[in-house]
Amino acid sequence: MPLEAPLAPLEERVADLNARYKHHSATQVVRDALAAPEIGPLAMVSSFGAESVVLLHMVARADRTTPVIFLDTQMLFQETLDYQVEVSEKLGLTDVRVIHPDTDQVFKRDPDNILHLADTDACCDLRKVEPLANAIAPFDGWITGRKRFQGGKRVDLQFFEIEDGRIKVNPLAHWAPEDVQDYMINNRLPRHPLVGRGFPSIGCAPCTSPVKPGEDPRAGRWRGAEKTECGIHFVDGKMVRVGAEQ
């Protein structure tokens, strides 16, 4: 049998993918990315938040066996935990991996569950960044629900990018807010119960509050602080703390 040609450098592969899929739909990006040899094994990372069901639905239609990583920080709303079960069952996802922060590290660094009051970045590192890094370690890339309209460093977001030596796939990069809502309505997807109670962006319970009419959708995340991102996304190997939920 002939030997397989070696893969091109990561930067070349990502540039080629972005050029090739520049005018393709989100569903096509999802379907092809999951089967692309130049990307390798992918997982989806989902918060099961306000808009997560859209991308979860696309992934389920493409391949229900795709690993879906759900990070339970142990400080989430009960509604989010219940919604994760409901959506997973409705979409028929067969490999949802619920991960948690390391028990020993939580006991050592946040034994009273009050770290978020003193240092939100340290709390996110402990409960989100570190366990997620361990969870995606076996994969060559991961799928996120980030979008350009979320602002910050995402305004130039492409379908494919490099993060920490992996390919990150952003199928909804070019979508507008109305695209998200239309997709949910047209596919009759269940909404997160907290959305109707004034939570357009949903994270951990202690750090998420309702948003008033006219406020930015992210205004309820870490209200009163400059922080707007948990830190799980990187650019050029550096943590980015701007943007919105995945």
Image (cartoon, rainbow, N blue to C red):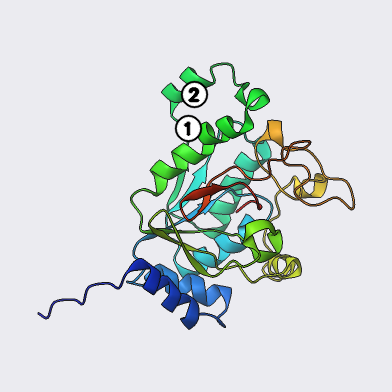
Q: Earlier in the sequence, mark 1 or mark 2?
A: 1
Residue 29, compared with residue 242, is above or below; it is below
Residue drawn 71% across the image and 54% down it: 191
Mark 2 residue element = helix
Dot 2 amino acid type: Val
Viewed as shown, does residue 208 lie left or right of 127? right
- Disc 1 + disc 2, Cβ < 8 Å: yes
> In this orientation, which residue lies closer to the viewer: 219 or 210?
219
Dot 1 amino acid type: Pro
Report the quarter where the C terminus lies. bottom right
Using a 10 Å C-alpha cutoff, classify the residue at mark 2 as few (fewer than 14 neighbours), some (14 to 19) or many (20 or more).
some
Residue drawn 77% across the image and 42% down it: 220
In the displayed orientation, state which residue is furthest to the right.
213
> In this orientation, which residue lies closer to the viewer: 145 or 78?
145
x, y percent for residue 224:
78, 36
Residue 50 in sight from this viewpoint: yes
Residue 65 in sight from this viewpoint: no
The image quadrant that residue 94 belongs to is bottom left
Circle 1 is placed at which residue position?
101
Circle 2 is placed at which residue position?
106
Residue drawn 63% across the image and 21% down it: 114
